[in-house]
């Protein structure tokens, strides 16, 4: 990894760590904050759908726009700035509608993700390791944010507004490392967004389809793991503590799995991640003791560390010139699949918890078969 490229990776990683520390302080508390302002179940559902749906759309738009203007760093900076400012406005919300509106506007900051990933991809030759390092920073931000919330809740009895304000201040610090990031000069593409997507490599579109198919199952398993843990322990503090360890496991394994994908091939490592995901879901369908669920939760940390950076690296391998649009389209397609997957799984969850986990395992198994069959003949050892 070249020195200039390494510097970019660590600076972008530092920004993600600080921003995610702030975000993870707010995310688990948002449903409670919303209901305290008078919002009901419908409001919580709308909030969740808006966050994921708008994130997917803005990631695509941000990636395409960075290709169009030939600049990435500026979009990344503005994205982090918007996220930080909207957290401040969340703090002063007086109604559930105001809070939902500011959360929706905060998602505009996600337009930074695809341009940021494009900088990472262009900064290093070993993209698997590069994305792995960034994911490690990202996950450590989650660890720090959750720990801060636990301390504030347990030892100081902070209220939602106080925690949100501290989160906003931490997120603002994410802007500082960006001043030292070296932008990568790229060719400008004057196509509109439809033309840009249409011109993407057909092989890349097939890869994104497979990853989106898997996202119907891997839409946010950690949330249901938290619910299952909470039903066993009846303790939010214990559940959040395990979630913190899960984030730590992800941070510890991300760089290693990214590096292994550089050495052994992306497909092989992703297949391991998919297989482990299937095993975890089947285990959750039949195991219900505290330590069994905790073990499976931590194993999911390994899955997360495997899938997130390596899939990005795989997409980057086939993105050619329009990396912003390619990575944005990847995020967009996955995001839509995750929304649909979450709705289906949530419906099944209300009927039977075990049935939902079996459903996720089946979708994961189908995704693995499709990947093995298609990528074997088309993409060889990559």
Image: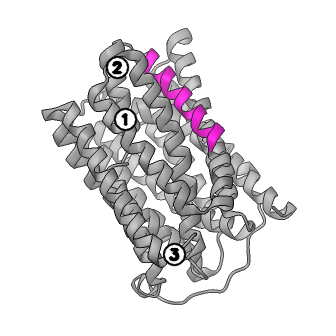
Magenta highlight range: 237-253
Q: Main secondary structure of the magenta part?
A: helix
- How many numbered marks, from 0 up? 3
* Mark positioned earlier in the residue sequence (1 or 2): 1
Q: Secondary structure at mark 1?
A: helix
Quadrant in the rendering for residue 197: bottom left
Disc 2, SS: helix
**Badge 2 or badge 3: first in the primary sequence:** 2
In this rendering, the answer to whether 270 lies above or below 141 is: below
Left or right of 330 on screen, residue 288: left
Q: Earlier in the sequence, mark 3 or mark 1?
A: 1
Q: Position of residue 373 (x, y in %)?
A: 38, 69
- The residue indicated by pointer 1 is 223
Query: Is 240 a magenta residue?
Result: yes
Q: Is residue 136 above or below residue 242?
A: below
What's the CA distance linking mark 3 and mark 1?
A: 34 Å
Which mark is drawn over residue 379?
A: 3
Q: Is residue 132 in view?
A: yes
* 269 horizontally vs 293: left or right: right
Q: Position of residue 59 (x, y in %)?
A: 47, 64
Q: Can you tell which mark lies on residue 230? A: 2
Residue 142 position, x and y percent, is 57, 36
Q: Residue at x 69, y 81 (%)?
A: 186
Taking the spot 48% from the left edge, 83% from the top edge, the residue there is 201
* Residue 152 vertical placement versus 354 (above, below): above
Please state the horizontal and vertical placement of residue 88, each as a whole percent of the image. Answer: 52, 40
165 vs 108, nearest the viewer: 108
Q: Nearer the viewer, residue 228 or 141?
A: 228
């Amino acid at each position: 990894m070249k020195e200039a490229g390494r510097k970019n990776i660590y600076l972008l990683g530092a920004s993600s760590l600080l921003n995610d520390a702030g975000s993870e302080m707010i995310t688990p508390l948002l449903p409670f904050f919303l209901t305290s302002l008078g919002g009901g179940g419908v409001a919580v559902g709308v909030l969740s759908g808006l966050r994921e749906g708008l994130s997917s759309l803005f990631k695509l738009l941000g990636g395409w726009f960075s290709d169009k203007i030939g600049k990435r760093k500026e979009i990344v900076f503005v994205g982090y700035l918007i996220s930080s400012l909207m957290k401040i406005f969340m703090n002063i919300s007086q109604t559930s509608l105001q809070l939902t509106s500011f959360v929706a506007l905060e998602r505009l900051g996600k337009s930074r993700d695809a341009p940021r990933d494009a900088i990472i991809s262009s900064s290093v030759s070993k993209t698997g390791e590069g994305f792995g390092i960034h994911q490690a920073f990202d996950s450590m931000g989650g660890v720090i944010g959750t720990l801060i919330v636990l301390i504030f809740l347990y030892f100081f009895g902070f209220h939602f507004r106080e925690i949100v304000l501290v989160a906003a201040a931490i997120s603002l610090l994410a802007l500082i490392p960006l001043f030292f990031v070296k932008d990568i000069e790229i060719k400008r593409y004057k196509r509109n967004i439809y033309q840009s997507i249409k011109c993407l490599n057909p092989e890349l579109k097939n890869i994104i389809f497979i990853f989106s198919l898997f996202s119907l199952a891997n839409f946010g398993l950690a949330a249901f793991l938290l619910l299952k843990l909470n039903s066993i322990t009846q303790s939010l503090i214990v559940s959040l503590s395990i979630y913190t360890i899960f984030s730590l496991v992800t941070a510890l394994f991300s760089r290693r799995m990214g590096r292994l994908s550089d050495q052994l091939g992306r497909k092989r490592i992703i297949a391991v991640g998919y297989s482990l995901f299937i095993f975890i879901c089947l285990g959750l369908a039949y195991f219900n003791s505290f330590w069994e669920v905790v073990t499976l939760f931590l194993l999911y940390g390994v899955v997360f560390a495997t899938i997130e950076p390596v899939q990005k690296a795989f997409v980057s391998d086939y993105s050619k010139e329009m990396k912003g649009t390619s990575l944005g389209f990847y995020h967009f397609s996955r995001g839509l699949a995750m929304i649909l997957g979450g709705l289906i799984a949530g419906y099944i969850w209300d009927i039977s918890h075990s049935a939902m986990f079996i459903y996720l395992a089946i979708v994961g198994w189908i995704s693995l078969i499709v990947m093995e069959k298609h990528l074997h003949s088309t993409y060889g050892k990559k």
